Amino acid sequence: MLLDFTTLAPRDAYPWLIGTITPRPIAWVSTISADGKTNLAPFSFFNGVCARPPTLMFSPVNRSDGTKKDTVRNIEAVPEFVVNLVPFALAEQMSESSASLPYGESEFAQFDIASTPSTRVRPPRVAAAPVAFECVLDRIVPIGDGPLAANVVFGRILLAHVSNAVLGPDGRPDPAKLDLIGRLGGDAYARTREVFTIERPD
Ligand SMILES: Cc1cc2nc3c(=O)[nH]c(=O)nc-3n(C[C@H](O)[C@H](O)[C@H](O)COP(=O)(O)O)c2cc1C
């Protein structure tokens, strides 16, 4: 089949994007509002960008009514956030936290997700996340406008908390111990436990 993305409606393009560009890592992003209310939400349009300076990105798209998600509103008000990574053990809580709560209501409190203070940024981090990147906002790049248009958030990584329990004997993260999940299409997820290696050419 052939899909012409120049004529597909955005709501029809979306499931093809999320069902084919897989598996995607999940940024579980904690933010805080100007008056100190915390927020937590998952985003799988997410990746690292570069190491000089250490940078990552994730992409909250506008809601179907065209408004910005709470995460974007918070980062515009307080330009700091934490990207927590999601192991299989936290999959259910991560999914619950994608519910749209009224602005100012915290997913941490609503879904009983334990938080702990961050070191250099104001939003707290997810206590049980094996890796948490404390970031300051680099820039927000708008792509398109209206429903499903994006506000791509680039974050400068200041600090990473890495649980000692996920390190291998070489001091690097061991994928089996990290046990992170990836998002597939629809409600499907993948685990990262089947690993193979390929030696790279010089
Ligand atoms: C696994 C997963 C991945 C998601 N990825 C995205 C994404 O990349 N971009 C997006 O806008 N919404 C994504 N969502 C939906 C948001 O999490 C959801 O809209 C959430 O309510 C946004 O919260 P906020 O308004 O508190 O920022 C995802 C949901 C799940 C469960």
Image: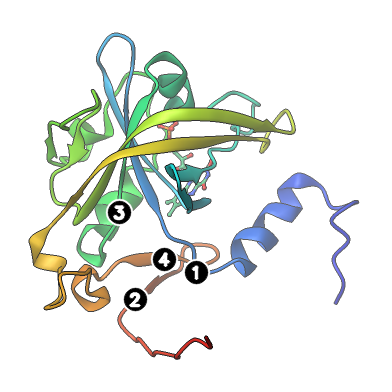
Q: Which mark is residue 85?
A: 3
Residue 145: x, y in percent? 73, 28
Please report whichever mark, 2 or 1, sits nearer to the chain's N-terminal start.
1
Q: Residues within 10 Å of mark 4 (few under 14, many from 20)?
A: many
The numbered dot on residue 23 is 1
Q: How many marks?
A: 4
Point out the tag, 2 or 3, that comes first from the N-terminus. Answer: 3
Task: Residue 162 in the image: state x and y as whole percent.
Answer: 17, 54
Farthest residue toward the front? 202
Nearer the observer: mark 4 or 3; the answer is 3
Residue shown at the point (20%, 52%) measured from the top left: 129
In x, y percent, where is residue 102?
Answer: 39, 22
The answer to which quarter of the image holds residue 61 is: top right
Please name the residue shown 74% across and 33% down the image: 144
Residue highlighted by disc 4? 182
Measured in 3D between alpha carbons, the distance from the residue under mark 2 to the one under mark 3, in whole angstroms, is: 13 Å
| Residue type (three-letter) at the residue carrying disc 3 | Leu
Judged left or right of residue 30, residue 44 is right
Question: In terms of depth relative to the viewer, which is nearer, 192 or 70?
Answer: 192
Tell me if label 2 and label 4 are in contact, CB under 8 Å. yes
User: What amino acid is labelled 2 in the image?
Assistant: Thr
Q: Are marks 2 and 3 in contact (CB under 8 Å)?
A: no
Q: How far apart are the two marked residues, 2 and 4, measured between alpha carbons?
A: 8 Å
Q: Nearer the viewer, residue 7 or 135?
A: 135
Amino acid type indicated by mark 1: Pro
Q: Quadrant of the N terminus?
A: bottom right
Q: Considering only order in the chain, which callout, 1 or 4, is on the residue closer to the N terminus?
A: 1
Q: Residue at x 60, y 60 (%)?
A: 18
Report helix, strand or loop for mark 2: loop
Residues at discs 4 and 1 in contact (Cβ within 8 Å): yes
Return the residue at label 2. 192
